[in-house]
Structure formats: C-alpha cells, structure tokens
Image: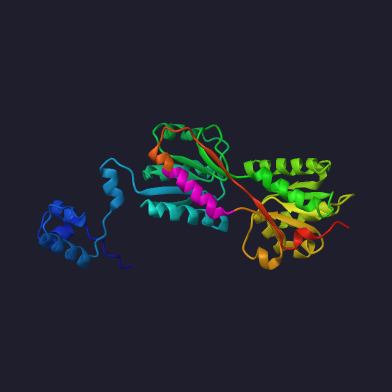
Amino acid sequence: MKQSKPRARIQDVAALAGVSPATASRALADHPKVTPKTKQKVVEAARTLRFRRNSLARDLRSGGVTTAVGYVIEDLVNPWFSQVAAGAERVFRKAELELIVATTEGDPKREQLVVKTMLERRVQALLLIPLSEDHSYLEGERQLGTPLIFVDRPPVNLIADSITIDNRGGMRLAVEHLAKHGHKRIGLLAGPEPLWTTGERLEGYKSGLSTHGIEFDKSLVRNVQYLESEVNSAALELLNVSNPPTALIATNNRITVLLLKSNKELLDKIAFVGFDDFELSELLGITVVTHDPLDIGREAALLTLERIENPLDTPQRREIGTTVIARGSGERRAR
C-alpha cells in the first residue's frame, strides 16, 4: 500500500525560506519584528509545502487553553442537537471561538470518557447534554474554573450553569389544549424513566390534568425505549384498555416520529399532541408543543461567554418558554 506523504513541519518551511524555525514561526504569526521581505519568503515557502499550523499544539505548549468550546451530545441523528449547535455556533463565531462536537451515542457510561477527552484537549468551556445520573466527577474541573454549561437537563450532584426548557409548563399547555377540545381521557407515551426531562414532563402532565379536574390514571401512561416496535405496541396497549383514551401526548419528537413510522393510521383516528417540533410536522398536520432550539443554543453560548468572563459568579439556571402550534391532529374533538 502506498504511504501518504508526511505533512510539512515548521522546520521544513524554515529550511525552504532560508531562515530559522523560530523566525518562520514568528513570520506566520504575523510578528511585527519580522521584516516584510522575510515574511513573504516564509509565507511563500509555507504555501509551496502546503504547511498548516498546529494551533492546538501551540496553545498547549504555552500552558493555555484552545479557542474551542466542547459540545457533548447524545447522537448525530436527532436534528434537535444540531439546531442547538447552530444557535451556539453563531454566538461563538463572533467571539472567535470554535465549537467542536462529540457524542456519547446515548450511553451514560460513555459520558465520562467523552468529557475527559474534551477536557484533555483543553477546551475553554464545555457544553454538555447529560445522560449520567451523577456529575460529581466534574467538581474538580469546576474548581479549576472551566465553565460547565448543562443543556436540556441540569446536572446531578454538581452546582453548575444550565439551560433547560419549561418542560412542566409545556406539558400543561398540551393537556390544556386537548381539554379545551373536550378530552378527559388523555394517554401519555413517555420516554425512559431515568431521564430528567421524562420526569419533568410527567409532572407537568399530572399538573395539567389536575388543573382541569381530570383524575390521573396510571393505566394511561406508558414509558418506552426508542424502538419503533415498542412505541407502536405501547400505543396499541393504551387504545385497548377498558376505558381507552380519546387523545394521546408524546413526550418528545423521537416518540412521535417512531409512532408515525409504525402506525400513522392510529394518529388519524385520535387527537394527538407531540412535544418538540420536527421536520415535516407541518406537512403531516401534527400539533406540537414547541420551543426554539436555536434560542437554547444562543442562550447556552451567551451564558458560556459570561462564565468565561466571570468564573466566580453564582451559577445560573435559565429556562426557555414553550408554545403550542395547532396543525390539526390536536384539534380533533372528543367523541
């Protein structure tokens, strides 16, 4: 197998330009003490050799941190994560910071490993969508002054900044929307129980029922893993209880999409509200409780910059509001 050509080093650039490696390095850094003639020679040599500066190594050698901010997410499949990243990246770009992304693949056990790798790269700050049930492993890093911003869910056993949405309020809006259309039997397809967002949305569901004088019925709640067959089975179970629901709520867009893939006919027969918007929801006429993930990203980035500037300030917990977008599925009246 033919081996690839090794990358040019600063020593190679210096040799071609006829200067010392130190002078070549200063020239590429636009040092004011390097003459224009020398700088031109070095730049031309670097272009000829296709030399690329290793800014990460340079920063670490000087004992500093990089211009990067780490962003640890569950996976690259859910577009919600990328939208949050887009909102954050726009803010960081103006601050001359770069966002680098890594995934835990939805595995809580991988979280510490991925976070450790990010921190070893000396990122200026870390944005984390957490899965672990204990974040005390980051206490030492917090004490060192590294800004830690938890997104979508707050940390556990750690005092740090967080950006979340109004999960309880959003679910109350979903229940209220269905109750206004005459529904008193409202089923819930919820995510895995350990997730903080699942618990918050369940409490919002209960609160919404209570507000409208509807008694909570545990038989109308199903917790599901993110598998098409399991979501479909849970939905069919709910519709086959002795006193079935006339409406359904899904606690996140992954469940909604899986239900659409496995049994769209079911959603044509029953009132339905999904939590979190998703691509094609408008075309499919799915009523949703939504928020702006770009706004979450922006807020997370702005809070990160504040924390970089003022590392000793009291950690904040900011909450993004939600709203209902009516598109048809949630407006079917109870029979």
Question: Does the rendering let one see residue 203?
Answer: yes
Quarter of the image with the N terminus is: bottom left
Give me the residue at 76% from left, 49% from top.
Answer: 176
Q: Nearer the viewer, residue 148 or 334?
A: 334
Tell me if residue 12 comes above or below residue 305 in the rendering: below
Q: Position of residue 257 (x, y in %)?
A: 67, 60
Magenta stretch: residue 251 in it? no
Q: Position of residue 69 (x, y in %)?
A: 41, 48
Q: How many numbered marks have been drawn onto this rendered protein structure?
A: 0
Question: Does the rendering let one see residue 198?
Answer: no
Tell me if residue 151 comes above or below residue 259 in the rendering: above
Q: Position of residue 300 (x, y in %)?
A: 49, 46
In the image: residue 226, left or right of residue 156: right
Q: Nearer the viewer, residue 23 or 83?
A: 83
Q: Give, as a single range, the part of the protein colored magenta.
A: 292-305
Q: Nearer the viewer, residue 185 or 235?
A: 185
Name the quadrant containing residue 89. bottom left
Give me the residue at 15% from left, 51% from top.
Answer: 22
Tell me if residue 279 comes above or below residue 171 in the rendering: below
Tell me if residue 161 comes above or below residue 173 in the rendering: above
Name the quadrant containing residue 130. top right
In the image: residue 108, left or right of residue 120: right
Name the magenta segment's main secondary structure. Answer: helix
Q: Position of residue 48 (x, y in %)?
A: 20, 67
Magenta stretch: residue 297 in it? yes
